[in-house]
Image (spheres, rainbow, N blue to C red):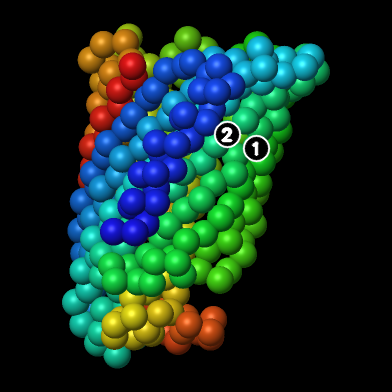
Amino acid sequence: MMHLRLLALLSASLPLVLSAATLAGETSWSANGLFGSPGSLGGGGQATQDRFAFGSDTSGSDIGNTLPPPTDWDSRIDIRLEQQHWHFDSPAAFGGNAPWGDVTRSSVGVRLDYQGSPGWRYSVEPSIAYAGEAGANQSASMGLGALFAASHQVQPNLLLGLGAGVFRQADQTRVFPYVLVDWHINNQWRLANPNQTSFTGPAGVELSYQSSQAWQLAAGGSWRSDLFRLSDNNGVARNGVGEASAVPVYLRFGYSMQPGWKIDIYAAALFGGKLNVDDSNGNAISSDHYRPSRMIGVNFNGRF
């Protein structure tokens, strides 16, 4: 498909472009699957979702060798691919028609980090993204965005910061703030943002307990909203816009098989779930909420 070919081209070309700046680093990857139980819709009916995702981060060691002083710059390439499978059973709020089916989300971003005055770090990450239901118009499903963040190493064991994301997707511009935290309370307890590759994304908070070198237990939560273009044969709003939002709260059981390789098992619940459909002109068509639903999943992480 066009969007996958485009992202494949970007994924192949960006490392070549950045290699010209003498980048040399390591790559981490993740692959995960989440499986949901049916959630009752407020207007009647049920909704079920499963998610499968792959991500990779390629970090550069230092681009300072190609820049005039100061040389405290780092870089990273982020690639994300996600497939969402939705199933609806008699959703009354949408006239008995499924508001959408399978949804594909993918993105490629380049992050630049700058180490400023002692203890301060600044970052910016522009990205190009695709978000659309199967059969959606390819160009109308493309989007642009950027993340901005500033953090300060308050103490050797405590980092605090603020960030903001600005994204243009499906003819809508959205801005959301988030908090950066990384607090090593002691050798076993840590309060931090979730891993970039977790199913909630990094804009949340997670408390983890390292019971041994291999085992970890954690609990966390976030807020997630997915905006995407609907297909041209959608039964509710042709070429419209769909949105699914919720607050995922989870328990995570992690096991490190060897340095750089890890498996996580998730048990999650989605609260405050809401489904929205707008027409192609941005006018609200219908919406519904779904009661708390359960999800289980597994995530594999590797590094090379």
Q: Is residue 5 left or right of residue 160?
A: left
The residue pinned by badge 2 equals: 111
Q: Is residue 206 left or right of residue 41?
A: right
Q: Quadrant of residue 110?
A: top right
Image quarter of the C terminus: top left
Using the image, determine if residue 168 lies above or below residue 93.
above
> Taking the image as drawn, is residue 86 in sight?
yes
Q: Residues within 10 Å of mark 2 (few under 14, many from 20)?
A: many
Disc on the earlier residue, 1 or 2: 2
**SS at mark 2 in the image:** strand
**SS at mark 1 in the image:** strand
Q: Is residue 170 left or right of residue 27?
A: right
Instruction: Identify the residue shown where x is 52% and y is 31%.
Output: 17
Q: Position of residue 124 (x, y in %)?
A: 65, 37
Q: Amino acid at mark 2?
A: Arg
Q: Position of residue 283 (x, y in %)?
A: 53, 85
- Say which of 93 and 113 sits in front: 113
Q: Amino acid at mark 1?
A: Val
Image quarter of the N terminus: bottom left
Numbered tag placed on residue 247 in the rendering = none
- Say which of 231 and 203 sits in front: 231
Using the image, determine if residue 41 lies above or below residue 27.
below
Q: Quadrant of residue 64?
A: top right
> Taking the image as drawn, is residue 185 in sight?
no
Q: Is residue 80 left or right of residue 175?
A: left
Instruction: Identify the residue shown where x is 79% and y is 14%.
Output: 69
The residue pinned by badge 1 equals: 124
Instruction: Identify the residue shown where x is 66% and y is 41%.
Output: 148
Instruction: Identify the residue shown where x is 77% and y is 21%.
Output: 116
Tell whether label 2 touches label 1 (CB within 8 Å).
yes
- Say which of 26 and 241 sits in front: 26
Using the image, determine if residue 304 lies above or below residue 162.
above
